Image (tube, rainbow, N blue to C red):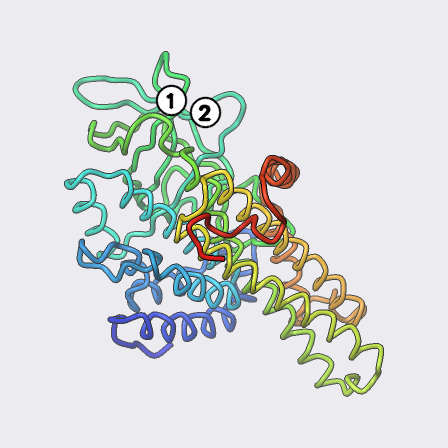
Amino acid sequence: MEAAPAARSAEDLLRAARRIAEAAAARADAEDRDDGFPAEDVADLARAGLLAAPTPRDAGGLGLGEEPGAHRLAEVLRRIGSGSLALGRLYEGHVNALRLVARYGDAAQRGRLFADARAGHLFGVWNTEPPEGGLTIAERDGGLALAGCKTFASGAGFVTRALVTARAPGQSAPVMLVVPLPAGARADLSDWRAQGMRASATGTVSFTGLCVAPDAVLGRPDDYHRQPDFSGGAWRFAAVQLGGIEAVFDAWRSHLARTGRGEDPHQLARLGEGAITLEGARLWVEAAARTAAEARLPDDRIVAFVNLARLAVERAGLDVLQLAQRSVGLQGFLRGHPLERLSRDLATYLRQPAPDRALTGAAAEILRAEGAAGDLWRPSDEGV
């Protein structure tokens, strides 16, 4: 990709995201392997200023995702996801980490870590761990000694600033800390043999033997799980998924046009159904981003709405996959066909944790709510 100046405005960010998505899409097949990683695409993000863009305006950044501009972040995530879901997953984790730093970091931490983002460091948020051997911290020689590991860590071996949760002896609530990591170290990708998202470099990272300074700890115990941010931020991965759904839809539509099968009324009916489903997912993502950013609803109501949005996008993705695969037929399952890898990546990335709990929790909040269904998501201070 031809080098372009670093983004200086929201419009620049959107143009940069489109360019990077196009380049990522062209490289994605070559990176679709067990040891794959979109290194060139991440470098493009850094050169275009997108790794630094989520830093707040008061810290010299562009404030991508700051209220009231959440819709711009949704658009950037969507565009990057349409080019590569693996890249979108990594960028969403980077954004998530910087937002946690912005919310819970003190002045010194914010200054240091935002400078790292501007310098091109890739951040990630890793909180999953095995039942035994999870990450712990203990005071030692004026610092904090780490032991244990994180699993299903996307960008393992490539993330150089890992925001992780860990427990101290005698504490039930985890703390957050940001751990500097050398590239290419401490990562084991051998268990990541997934059907899709092979280029996300997802694996296990061992922290045993590392020591960090006390100022690596971010915020207070259990700030990581504080609502509505913890669940309310799910709209960001839904925005990336939306981009992946669009990519599947476009590959399907291109196949029909290229093969001359678009005149068949059954094919047209399926394509029309897919377009309806896709647009519904887009509206859910936009509404969820706005609802979370404006924070005008009670916390539980925000969480409920975003959970419904993430499930609506999941359903849309599964529906579009089924329609596209039925429409294209066996060719769409053959390696080399554009739909084959896109379908694997999307089906894998749609598998987000605890979907049943998200649905029943949202339904319980709806059951508790008073007033008419049409007012469930309307702020109480909004005129009638």
Mark 2, residue position: 134
Q: Nearer the viewer, mark 1 or mark 2?
A: 1
Residue 316 position, x and y percent, is 66, 59
Q: Residue at x 35, y 62 (%)?
A: 69
Q: Residue placed farthest to the front in the image?
A: 384
Numbered disc total: 2
Decide: marks 1, 2 in contact (CB < 8 A)? yes
Give the structural element (helix, strand or loop) at label 2.
Answer: loop
| Residue at the spot 24% in from the left edge and 71% down from the top edge | 8
Q: In which quadrant will I find the N terminus? A: bottom left
Left or right: residue 270 compared with residue 2: right
- The amino acid pointed to by label 2 is Gly
Q: Give the crowd class for mark 1: few <14, some 14-19, many >=20 residues within 10 Å.
A: some
Q: Earlier in the sequence, mark 1 or mark 2?
A: 2
- The answer to which of 170 and 364 lies nearer the viewer is 364
Q: Position of residue 102 (x, y in %)?
A: 27, 45
Give me the C-alpha separation between circle 1 and circle 2.
8 Å
Q: Position of residue 275 (x, y in %)?
A: 67, 72
Q: Residues within 10 Å of mark 2 (few under 14, many from 20)?
A: some
Residue 260: quarter of image: bottom right
Is 133 positioned to the left or the right of 95 in the image?
right
Observer-nearest of 169 and 319 = 319
Residue at left 57%, top 39%? Answer: 191
Is disc 1 placed on a helix, strand or loop? loop
Query: Hey, what amino acid is under mark 1?
Result: Arg
Q: Give the left or right position of residue 258, taking residue 63 as reference.
A: right
Residue underneath mark 1:
167
- Side (left or right) of 56 relative to 169: left
* 111 vs 129, nearest the viewer: 111
Classify 154 as above or below 214: below
* Up-down relation of residue 353 to residue 264 (above or below): above
